[in-house]
Amino acid sequence: MASGIEEIVPSSGMEDNISKMSIKDPTRDSKVVIAAIDFGTTYSGYAYAFRDNLNKRNTSDETTMVLSNHWQSGSDARLVSNKTPTCLLLTPAGKFDSFGFPAEIKYNNLVNDDEHRGWRFFKRFKMVLLHEKNLNKDMLIADDQNQCVEALTVFAHSIRFIKNDLQKQLTKTGYDIDDVEIQWVITIPAIWNPRSKQFMRVAAHKAGIKDEQLEFALEPEAAAVYVKETKVTKQRVSVDQHDLVPFPSGTQFMVLDLGGGTIDISVKEVLPDRTLKELHRASGNGLGGDSVNIRFFEYLETVFGENVMSKFKSDNTYKAALYDLEMEIEQKKRCLEFDSKSNIVIVIPPNLVDLFEENDKSFNEHVQSLEGIEYKKGKLHINKTIITEIFKPSVTGIVTLVRDILTQHQITNLSNIMVVGGFSRSQIIYKTVTDVFSAESINVIRPTDPDMAVLKGAVLYRYWPEVVRTRRSPFTYGSRLLRLWIEGDEVGKQIKKGHEVLCGDHFEKFVTINDEFETGQTVTVEVYPVAADTTKMTIDIYTSTKPNPRYTTDVGCEPLGRLVVDMPDTTRGLDRRAEVIMSMGSTEIVVEGKMMPDGTPTKVVFDMLNAK
């Protein structure tokens, strides 16, 4: 058996090989419940709706048909939240113990009683899917005590808990719903690459969600679906009366989804049939709310010293105090305002002060030598200037990202920016975005429930996936191949085979970044055997952040995965051709294979997690 990418012959006009592929689940309309899971960096939750209710809905009221859970956030039953922390606790034996608030509370109690050693506590682990370049099925992630567990296990336990909790919620309300009657959608950041999506699909499958019952929704896109039907536009109904109605046809709006880990942006236009057209590829960065927490701790290092803070964060003795300080910062971060006349007040754990004073220094005297802060009765009073600097990278990053999209891509008719996500509750962030863009005649609107916009929108999207008419490619896609040498090619790429002079690492492009695709639209990649007895072909697929990469080794190029194409019938030797059809207009890449010229189906596997 022979295989290899170097011998693949590029098809002419590959970017023109575009068609439509039906990706609609044939059983979609038979599902009783549509359930969405928002698996966030900091907080997670779910929402659901009964299909019958959505079928009977008044279009303007469809958002009220979506229900969500209320999580108890403490021993007081009155303390409830729409979401629960993305925290997982495993027993010392590696078995599931708890998730969310219960996991957080139990682990904190174990720490207070000095009984936490061996227990495995994970939090904020979702970001590994954004940052890990070598993401694979066997990847390990470390817990709070640097014990490593397979990442797939951690994600699967978490998804399974949320899935089971929803089913318990349905049972409590008197509904007997079987697994097969639920259609699931998991929300994901727009800036994730296809490999991260495949990892999440494998984790969901391990958690008990069947592939055919799962679809992904891009977080800012889901929010856009929700926002589209939110009543935010004034419409005159009489001389002295206006009603609020959803965005009219032709409205161009931006969704700024500010989460704990990422900032995601999507720009849409409402079409006459109430579907959405994407005006710019979904984009973003990793400057979500957690980055502010990190900078708070970096500032505390300048106050207490790097060595003191390092010991405070790493020594198990201080685990409970560290947790309290993290919660204090998270709470204060959301309510801070730029125009506040008073300082921010942070409660400092007494044992952190004791740790500082182990070096025979008075913390009170030390603080007096620092500018912009005071220490009174166990609390640090930090002035506005310092807080502004802590928030500055996130504020600047958000404004710059929005401006770049508006200016570089000539989006001139944008009238609204909808700010959603948990981080949008930060008054500093919201006020800054409002002040900057209101001055440019753009309305900045924050819904009454900004942290639920993605979840509710995901349910509505799964009910009507065709609501998103077009999407734009987040990357340039291509394959690596060996082609004939062309004058001007890099000398280091030259390969001689017999009498032929060839060029290696050629990037054979089939999709350009920001290309527009309708839902279900596909591209076709032609595959030829390298030898008469070849029964499988392996094709290395690459992505690039540039529109026209020349080589797969260029800056911005990354290996994505491998297509393995079955070509079992060797009767015709080298005179064979397979076509790999790749859906590019969906939230994830789906592949099909055909042997030509008769179109006989053939097996194609797109492996993005094990490819080396």
Image (tube, rainbow, N blue to C red):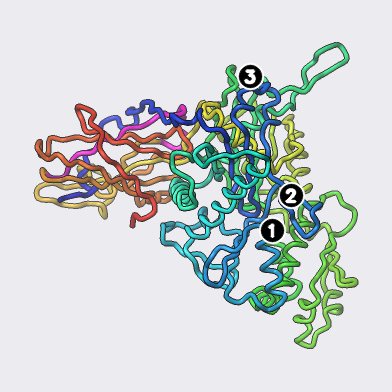
Task: First in sequence, mark 3 or 1: give its number.
Answer: 1
Which is more N-terminal, label 1 or label 2? 2
CB-based contact (under 8 Å), mark 3 and mark 2: no
Q: Residue placed at 39% from the left, 53% from the top?
A: 609
Horizontal side of 186 relative to 58 (left or right) equals: left
At mark 3, the secondary structure is loop
Residue 256: image quadrant is top right
Q: Is residue 301 visible?
A: no
User: Horizontal and vertical percent for residue 392?
Assistant: 71, 53
Amino acid type indicated by mark 2: Ser
- Name the residue tied to disc 3: 249
In the rendered structure, the answer to whether residue 203 lies left or right of residue 63 reads left
| Amino acid at the residue labelled 1 | Phe
Q: Amino acid at mark 3?
A: Ser
- Assess whether mark 1 and mark 2 are in contact (beta carbons under 8 angstroms): yes
Give the magenta part as a residue range.
512-531
For label 3, count other residues whose C-alpha is less than 10 Å away and answer few (under 14), some (14-19) or many (20+). Answer: some
78 relative position to 525: left or right: right
